[in-house]
Image (cartoon, helix red, strand yellow):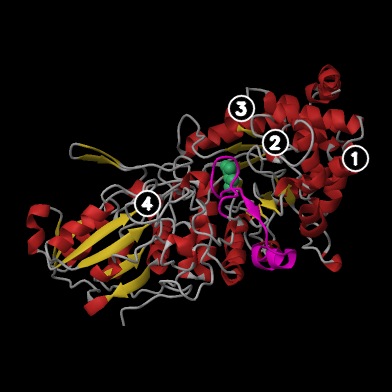
């Protein structure tokens, strides 16, 4: 059937695509451009003019690299994205602005001139862009527990995204991590719904601006996305998709518990006016979220009066996720249609976008998707575009370009680093470091901006600074823990020693250890993994050796852990004088040193339970943990 329909759907596609080759309507023929009209009315006016092809074009998002010149115009594509590391030739504000405007010009030259949304994962700052301010990943922000800081982070992130001419970020991730063996643990604020209540709305408000104010979705504000709906952080170990152990797995808890624990972030984000929500790769009781009408449509989008969340924006699918709904019978087309009918409004079938348009065109004709579902999806998409002011200001400008990575923005990130630090042990008041002390510094995480930033930095999986001889090339501009310690010591007539031959001269050693960068399933702990500092996989080589050399020299050790989650340190903790958790601090690593020297006190509290062993996992809420959720010491 579909085979014959290919020819048929191609004929349909040609017949339906004709409007895109017509001249653009004049402004007088576009009453929806009248900003004095309510958005709902403007949407109705525009929707009434749209052909089926123009509507289905709005329902697909194409990856930048999967487009040929002219495709956006020919197919009326609604959105373009850059996946992790998908960059323009020049990874600069000017390079991004040129890319966005080239695509936007195509879109404005279609018959109806509906602008595109350009989406990107700016998940801890504008992390795809060289020179951007890189904030601590979410788990560190969960440790900081500072709502006002969250709004500042959102505001700065939006400013730096706007500095490159983009208008949409796939953030915040509001996952509520339950098992820290999950590779996306660091993308979660932590294991409790209280953190969602405390932090989510303020981050969304920072990104989009406050609803009801002139800031809302104007100026240097952008469209936000709460993700991944629903229950991504509740997946069970050994239920992972394909060969991975937990990512994109299955959630089993009772429905009311699912909604209460994993739904809180969406309640908060919707309250703050979030414009888009991303469906999760994960499943709930065996039904993939991209096929889950009961939750996507009958709860998320249903009116509050009937027990729903009343979400009025649109649901974006995740990367090629529609084809992964394995429980849905039939071929790819059947899975795609099922996802749209379940409540996904825009498909991120990023390189299959043309196929998705064909499937939609053919399926309206044969009734497997109703016109009402198409119109509801497009109405939602257009509502967000009108809300975002895209029709008034479609073209990217360089008015904010000088803000990228500014000192003022980096100061917000430095504040976040300091507030995220958690002090778990401090025997004999080893901390704060004495201003005049000789401090030995070593460890794979002590002097590497790339390692500090973790995944989703310049590329999907993140990367490392490069050292050739004495020349160091940072992955992206930033400062390191070592540089911060050197600055603090210099200010206080102390000395930082990095030459191991002089180790014995030091009164204390600061050893920075942790995990190498990773993202998503590539961070899942493999079967049998022990999550100790020398476990195979994502642990940095040299962790144990760096600590041992200081201990063997009889020098007291302050361990600084730079990782995307708690690690199992039970057996060696007693040998350490102090333990500081820095999570994945981002580009402003020097700020850690200010707290180690006591310029400010520790205020961070554990956002997740710290297990005694991997056998304790999932440990969320455990009372027999090494350190409980919410634990954190101070210097005074
Ligand atoms: C990824 C992630 C999602 C991200 C999207 C686009 O697979 O699951 O968080 O926003 O693809 O990069």
Secondary structure of residue under mark 3:
helix
Of mark 2 and mark 3, the one earlier in the sequence is: 3
* Residue position marked by numbered label 3 in the rendering: 66
Label 2 with label 3: CB-CB less than 8 Å? no
* Residue position marked by numbered label 1 in the rendering: 370
Label 1 and label 4: CA atoms lie apart by 49 Å
Magenta span of residues: 237-265
Tell me where residue 483 sits by quadrant: bottom left
Mark 3 or mark 4: which is in front?
Answer: 4
Image spot of residue 547 (x, y percent): 22, 59
Secondary structure of residue under mark 2:
helix
Label 1 and label 3: CA atoms lie apart by 28 Å
Q: Is 552 part of what is drawn in magenta?
A: no
Image spot of residue 513 (x, y percent): 30, 56
Label 2 and label 3: CA atoms lie apart by 18 Å
Label 2 and label 1: CA atoms lie apart by 20 Å
Residue 318, numbered circle: none
Label 3 and label 4: CA atoms lie apart by 33 Å
* Residue position marked by numbered label 2 in the rendering: 323
């Amino acid at each position: 059937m579909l085979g014959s329909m290919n020819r048929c759907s191609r004929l349909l596609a040609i017949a339906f695509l004709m409007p895109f080759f017509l001249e653009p309507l004049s402004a007088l023929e576009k009453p929806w451009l009248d900003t004095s009209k309510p958005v709902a009315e403007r949407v109705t006016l525009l929707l009434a003019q749209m052909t089926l092809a123009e509507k289905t074009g709005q329902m697909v998002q194409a990856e930048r690299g999967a487009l040929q010149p002219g495709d956006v115009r020919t197919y009326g594509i609604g959105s373009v994205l850059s996946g992790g590391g998908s960059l323009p030739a020049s990874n600069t504000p000017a390079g991004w602005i040129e890319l966005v405007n080239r695509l936007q010009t195509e879109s404005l030259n279609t018959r109806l001139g509906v602008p595109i949304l350009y989406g990107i994962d700016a998940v801890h700052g504008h992390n795809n862009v060289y020179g951007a301010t890189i904030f601590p990943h979410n788990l560190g922000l969960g440790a900081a527990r500072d709502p006002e800081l969250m709004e500042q982070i959102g505001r700065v992130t939006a400013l730096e995204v706007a500095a490159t001419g983009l208008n949409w970020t796939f953030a915040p991730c509001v996952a509520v991590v339950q098992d820290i063996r999950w590779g996306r643990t660091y993308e979660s604020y932590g294991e409790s719904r209280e953190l969602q209540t405390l932090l989510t709305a303020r981050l969304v408000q920072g990104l989009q601006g406050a609803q009801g104010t002139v800031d809302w979705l104007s100026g240097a504000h952008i469209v936000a996305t709460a993700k991944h709906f629903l229950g991504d952080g509740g997946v069970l170990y050994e239920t992972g998709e394909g060969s991975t152990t937990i990512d994109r797995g299955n959630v089993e808890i009772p429905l009311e518990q699912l909604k209460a624990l994993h739904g809180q972030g969406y309640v908060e984000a919707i309250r703050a006016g979030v414009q888009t929500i991303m469906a999760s790769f994960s499943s709930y009781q065996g039904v993939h979220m991209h096929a889950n009408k009961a939750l996507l449509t009958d709860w998320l989008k249903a009116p509050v009066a009937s027990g729903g969340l009343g979400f009025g924006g649109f649901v974006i699918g995740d990367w090629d996720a529609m084809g992964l709904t394995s429980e849905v019978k039939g071929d790819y087309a059947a899975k795609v249609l099922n996802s749209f009918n379940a409540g996904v409004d825009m498909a991120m079938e990023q390189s299959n976008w043309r196929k998705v348009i064909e499937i939609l065109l053919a399926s309206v004709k044969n009734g497997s998707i109703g016109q009402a579902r198409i119109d509801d999806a497009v109405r939602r998409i257009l509502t967000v575009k009108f809300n975002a002011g895209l029709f008034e200001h479609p073209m990217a400008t360089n008015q904010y370009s000088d803000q990228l990575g500014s000192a003022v923005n980096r100061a917000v990130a430095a504040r976040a680093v300091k507030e995220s630090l958690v002090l778990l042990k401090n025997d004999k008041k080893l901390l704060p470091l004495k201003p005049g002390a000789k401090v030995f510094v070593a460890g794979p995480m002590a002097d590497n901006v790339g390692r500090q930033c973790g995944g989703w930095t310049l590329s999907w999986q993140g990367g490392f600074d490069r050292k050739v001889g004495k020349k160091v090339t940072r992955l992206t501009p930033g400062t390191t823990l070592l540089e911060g310690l050197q600055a603090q010591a210099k200010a206080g007539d102390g000395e930082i020693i990095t030459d191991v031959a002089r180790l014995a001269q030091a009164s204390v050693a600061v050893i920075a250890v942790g995990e190498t960068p990773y993202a998503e399933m590539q961070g899942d702990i493999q079967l049998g993994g022990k999550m100790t500092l020398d476990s195979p996989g994502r642990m940095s080589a040299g962790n144990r050796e760096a600590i041992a050399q200081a201990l063997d020299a009889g020098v007291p050790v302050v361990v600084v852990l730079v990782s995307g989650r708690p690690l199992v340190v039970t057996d060696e903790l007693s040998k350490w004088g102090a333990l500081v958790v820095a999570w994945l601090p981002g580009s402003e690593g020097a700020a850690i040193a200010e707290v180690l020297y006591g310029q400010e006190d520790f205020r961070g509290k554990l956002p997740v339970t710290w297990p005694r062993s991997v056998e304790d996992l999932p440990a969320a809420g455990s009372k027999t943990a090494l350190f409980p959720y919410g634990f954190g010491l101070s210097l005074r």
